[in-house]
Structure formats: structure tokens, C-alpha cells
Amino acid sequence: MRIIALAFALALVATAAQAQYTSGTGSNPNSHTTSGYTRSNGTYVQPYTATNPNGTQRDNYGTSGNYNPNNGTFGTRTPRY
């Protein structure tokens, strides 16, 4: 019985650790894909995934402490507000 309880506890910890890794601390799970477009100077911008606007910069993928699951990088920008 102890082995089953230990296995369950380990599985629970592993699941929580994986969830934190994939969504990041404060990362916004609500996002949308933008279409590619051409800027006024002629530069083409590739389609990308962006977080939905919500009045804060603390949960954007590019903000320090957040993980972007789409490209596997961590944010580096300091939020302005």
C-alpha cells in the first residue's frame, strides 16, 4: 500500500512540475494567432502567436519570468506597468 501511495505522490509532483514548465509563471494561456502582414516600409512580418490583451504586461510571453511554449524561450523584458 505504501508503494502505491508513493507512486501516486510522485506522479502528482511530476504532473505539477510539467504544468509549471509548459505554462510558465504568470504566462497567459489565452492566446491567438496573427496573420502575416507587410509593414509600410515593405518588410514582411511572419504569422505569430500573441497573448490576448488584458490590461497587464506581466503575463505576456516576452515578459521576464514567463515561458513561451510556442518557441521554447523565456521572456526577458521588464513590464512597463
Image (cartoon, rainbow, N blue to C red):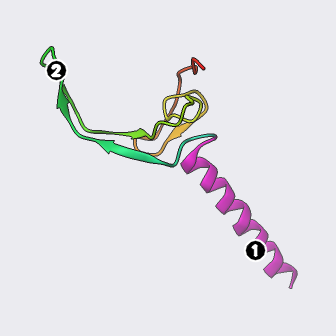
**Placement of the C terminus among the 4 image quadrants:** top right
Label of residue 39 in the image: none
Q: Is residue 12 magenta?
A: yes
Q: Disc 1 vs disc 2: Cβ atoms closer than 8 Å?
A: no
Which image quarter: residue 78?
Answer: top right
Judging by the rendered image, the residue that carries numbered circle 1 is: 7
**Placement of the N terminus among the 4 image quadrants:** bottom right
Which residue is at 16% across, 20% downward?
Answer: 43
Task: Work out how far the residue at label 1 is from the one at label 2, CA to CA, in angstroms.
Answer: 54 Å
Q: Is residue 48 above or below residue 22?
A: above
The kind of residue tagged 1 is Ala
Label of residue 43 in the image: 2
Q: Residue furthest right?
A: 2
Q: Residue furthest left?
A: 42
Magenta range:
1-25
**Left or right: 61, with 39 as reference point:** right
Looking at the image, is mark 1 or mark 2 nearer the viewer? 2
| Local crowd size for mark 2, using a 10 Å CA cut-off: few (<14), some (14–19), many (≥20) | few
Q: Which one is nearer the viewer's eye here, 81 or 26?
A: 81
Which residue is at 79% across, 81% downward?
Answer: 4
Q: Residue furthest top?
A: 41
Which image quarter: residue 3?
Answer: bottom right
In terms of sequence position, does the residue under pointer 1 or pointer 2 come before the other?
1
Which residue is at 52% across, 29% downward?
Answer: 75
Q: Element type at marker 1?
A: helix
| Residue 34 x %, y % | 29, 40
| Residue 42 x %, y % | 12, 18
| Residue 17 x %, y % | 66, 54
